[in-house]
Image (spheres, rainbow, N blue to C red):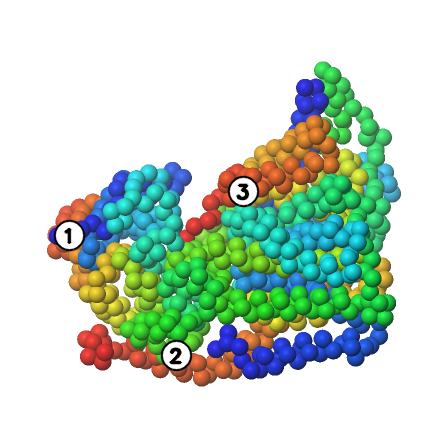
Amino acid sequence: MSENLLEVDHLTKRFGGVTAVNECSFTVQKGTITALIGPNGSGKTTVFNMVTGYLKADSGEIRFRGEAITRPRPADLYRRGLSRTFQQARIFPELTVEENLVVAAGYNSRQLFGRRVSDSDRDRATKMLGEFRLETLAQLPAADLSYGQRKLLEFAAVLMSDPMLVLLDEPTAGVNPVMIDAMEQHIRERHAAGVTFLIVEHDMQLVMRLCDPVIVLDQGAPIAFGSPDQIQKDPRVLEAYLGS
Amino acid sequence: MKFAITRAGLVRAGVFFLVLVLVPIVGGPGWLLNTLTFTIMYAALSSSWNLIGGYAGYPSLGHVAFFGIGAYATAIMFNGSVYGGYAPFLMLPVIGIGVALLSVPIGWVSMRTRADVFAIVTITLLFITQTLAFNLKEITGGAQGKSVAPAPFDVATYDWPFYYAMLIMLATAMAISMYFRRSKIGLSLATVRADEDKAHGVGVRVTAVKLIAFAVSSGLVAMVGGVWAYYVGFIYPQFAVDPLITIGMVLMAFLGGRGTLWGPVLGSFILVPAQEYFAQAFGASQLYLIAYAAVFLVIMLFLPRGILPSIAERLDRRRAGAAGAARDNAAAQVAPMPPSEVKVVR
Amino acid sequence: MHSLIQAVILGVLTGGVYALMASGQTLIFGIMKVVNLAQGVLVVLGAYLTYTLFTQWGVDPFLSILITTPLLFLVGVGVQWALLRPLHGDDVAQLSLLVTFAIALGVEGLLSFAYGATLTNVQPSYANFSWTILGYQVSLVRFVAFVLSLVVLGLLYLILQRTKFGRSVRATVQNPMSAQLLGVNANRVSALGFGLGAATAAAAGSVFGMLNSFNPGSHYDLISRLLTIVVLGGLGSIGGSVVAALVMGVASSVVSALASPIWSDFTFFVVLLLVLLIRPRGLFGARTRGAL
């Protein structure tokens, strides 16, 4: 049976007088690729930031793996299996591609005093880079990568901790069409391997062929939820995108 | 593999320290050993500052506070007697560990803020320490200062123990710097410097590594302060907690290249002799201050990244041809393959 | 009780002058994101100019503000143009901080060269005049200084609220990127802003010279107090720095009266650390942590 991996319950966030997220509730079920879509300014990224601990909610509750997250902190959540990427592909440009993966793999306080890149680190990183076909770039500074490659690298890096849930913030924005296909392929492979996804994305064709279910956000709250087919037929969604 | 210990690196360090070890034995004019002692002192201070200011990107402007605490610790403990002469040196590790522990809560509070506010908060640390040195008269002697009992060393080789103590401090600071670079501490610090928010997001133990760097850095600086107090023999608040010492450490790291192993050393070996020369040439301290400010401005305006990184960048550009080719190959591999074929290839 | 109230009065009057200095510094930060470590030395420079005008030409210290303010305004614009604008590199914020420190050292050196290191102060004939109201002493100089600070702060407020320059400044403080897109000339705003910050230092300096003995090294004391004030108020918030200056003024004056003057500066630092412990962004500062 389906199991709720992430539950967002009446989440609210105001910036000054503007309510960015308003009593927002939804769930992400284990094993899905759930999409979070909505017009610009509908609060998608704000929701992401609250779920991943970067922003404190004014009210509401977030539960991950059935446990309420009372003091959301990015590092803790990451270690518990919730990782994310950023819209602008945030990587560490001064580190090598390989080090970008190693640093994201997670290490305990004892390993902190160990080698910068140990042999087992290297094995794991090489395996991941192979999967993303970046292995020839392993020793280059990440600053040398193209934008698309950076997006792939950031994605590969957050997978190093074997997360249960990955939040992708516009994984294909600003990337060429071929790279979009590659990204889709990687998401599918990882999904097949058991990872759950929550994706904010503007490319509707991609959303419709990749994601199920789809959550539509407007003015900080969900207005529709369902399969891609249902969403496409929903008059409220059409209105949200075209109206106002 | 820029973080591996290479033979060239070992040879470089070996030659550098061998020459410095031999200097007193070979001899030379009297002023040389004195100038060199202060040069090595600043190299040690700057290398220690570099652990937090360079690698972590948290530019502390208050490190002279720890220097002063170390200096006062030595002066207070050895005010009456130095017990044969070597006891103050043997106490240094105790001072270092003590100050490192003391610095943990201080670092924890001040590193809740980001770089620019952090710089300000650490400056106030400097003023707090100075005020305490002035006001706690019973312990520090207040404005009157505090002296260390004279060292019973032979006049001919009087400077030697201090010189070698400073040299050991420099070697220690550089060894720790090297260790940071080669361990996950350095890797984690690099992520903190580049993008602290993102570092949190991939589970880096940000607070822990920042505190480690801050504490080790502070402890080392305090130990150098201990040697210094013993060497100069008499300290008072403005002298031991002098903003110019803080600025010296920072400036030398900036000049040579912060976040590098040899940058702070290079910066010190250029600036301290230059300082001595200014002081000689201009005599009057006001002009010395002006000259210092001018050098400072020139470095910031024309060499903002420091000497070593600028050279490295130039060398990198020469190598970029090869790297670029590798990247293009890889890009060609990733890019033009439609996803259906990608599966087959794998 | 009497001494407590007396201390509070003194603290408020002193705090007003610090509010003036700090408002300039926080304005500079708001516009350029530069922590100006030279603000203290600019105050001392203003005090020395007033001193020279008074002793050489007999210009009244309060009136000399009309001369020192425009002068330091130009100095500020020049500094920004020559030393801060050309900075480049990955961390301009850190570099600017150090550049302003270098400026502080350089000006300290120049002042020592010109005036020597002995303590001086500006002593007009009315320097020691004071009123006694309900048994509390209020010195004329302190009172006029306080009123003057309020007037200059008011002018600053008007400039920021009512002029085109002020609108550009406020736009830049809120969002530098969109301000530029809206046609705000960032370089010009920065130069004028730095000039304005220096001008407030000059006005405060004239007053400072009457209230305190000073020498070229005095800027360390000043900058340490100013930094705690602007951080406490929340960097970039002028209103916050005014409140913080008053809080600090009263706190240190009370400590000075009830405990000992040698601990009065210490209160600044302790208050600052306590506030940062609870609220890392200061009392009124915008949230920077975790901003994405």
Are the residues under marks 3 and 1 on the same chain? Answer: no
Callout 3: 10 Å neighbours few (<14), some, many (20+)? many
The one of C141 and B71 positioned closer to us in this rendering: B71
Q: Which amino acid does label 1 sit on?
A: Ser
User: In the rendered image, which quarter contains the C terminus of chain B?
Assistant: bottom left
Are the residues under marks 2 and 3 on the same chain? Answer: no
In this orientation, does residue B249 appear?
Answer: no
Q: In this view, does C146 lie to the left or right of C210?
A: left
Q: What element carries label 2?
A: helix
Q: In this view, does C246 lie to the left or right of B190?
A: right
Depicted C183 relative to depicted C49: above or below: below
Locate residue B342, reporting x and y percent: 23, 77
Q: State the image quarter where residue A20 is shown.
A: top left
| Viewer-side label of 2, 3 | 3
The one of C256 and A235 positioned closer to us in this rendering: C256
Residue that numbered label 1 is attached to: A2
| Viewer-side label of 3, 1 | 1
Are the residues under marks 2 and 1 on the same chain? Answer: no
Callout 1: 10 Å neighbours few (<14), some, many (20+)? few
Q: Do the residues labelled 3 and 1 touch (CB within 8 Å)?
A: no
The CA distance from mark 2 to mark 1 is: 43 Å
Residue that numbered label 2 is attached to: B327
Locate residue C30, reporting x and y percent: 55, 47
The CA distance from mark 3 to mark 1 is: 46 Å
In this orientation, does residue B115 appear?
Answer: yes
Q: What element carries label 1?
A: loop
User: Seen from this angle, which residue lies furthest top?
Assistant: C134
Depicted B83 relative to depicted C128: above or below: below
Q: Which residue lies at the image location 59% right of the left edge and 76% below the top edge?
A: B311
Residue that numbered label 3 is attached to: C276
Q: State the image quarter where residue C229 is shown.
A: top right
